[in-house]
Amino acid sequence: MDFKNDKSIYLQLAEWLEDAILSGAFPEESQVPSTTDISVNYRINPATALKGVNILVDSGILYKKRGLGMFVSEGARDNILQKRKIGFYEDYVRPMMAEGAKLGISRSDILTMIERSGIK
């Protein structure tokens, strides 16, 4: 957790768990650390840890097994990818295209710039 970051700790925690799921650290149907473990390891309030985990429960990424803890839902990785692709489009692609339009840069010129970056 980056305590100097403007983003709330609970949101950083939710993103950290999502990143761990995407990387395969927590495969589908595997157990994730408890909110107590998270709060102790990161020295954050247990209520903050619970709030971050509950974001993922509410979005269907994690589910609770009574008496056992939190587990990664089936299809969680695909759901995270889909959500992040939409976010990427909204946060980066649309603003880039709008700025390009203001500057009179054509779509084909933007594509050329992207291809010139060398990133595949």
Image: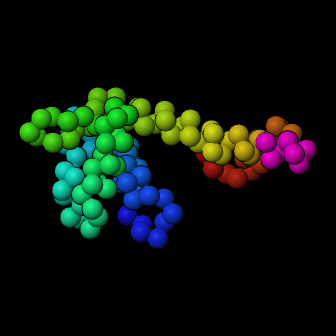
Mark yes or no: residue 46 visible: yes
Towards the viewer: 108 or 56: 56
Towards the viewer: 10 or 118: 10
Residue 98 in the figure: left or right of residue 92: right
The residue at the point 63 percent across, 39 percent down is 90
Q: Where is residue 107 drawn, in percent x and y?
A: 82, 37
Task: State whether residue 23 is above or below residue 36.
Answer: above
Towards the viewer: 80 or 3: 3
Task: State whether residue 48 is above or below residue 82.
Answer: below
Q: What is the total number of numbered labels drawn onto the structure image?
A: 0
Q: Where is residue 52 drawn, in percent x and y?
A: 34, 49
Q: Where is residue 115 drawn, in percent x and y?
A: 72, 45
The residue at the point 46 percent across, 70 percent down is 4
Mark yes or no: residue 38 visible: no
Q: Where is residue 100 drawn, in percent x and y?
A: 82, 45
Task: State whether residue 4 is above or below residue 88.
Answer: below
Question: Quadrant of residue 111 in the image?
Answer: top right
Quadrant occupied by the C terminus:
top right
The residue at the point 37 percent across, 54 percent down is 10
Magenta-tinted stretch: 98-104
Was residue 27 drawn as part of the magenta stretch in this picture? no
Q: Main secondary structure of the magenta part?
A: helix
**Residue situated furthest top in the rendering:** 75
**Residue situated furthest right in the rendering:** 104
The residue at the point 27 percent across, 62 percent down is 45
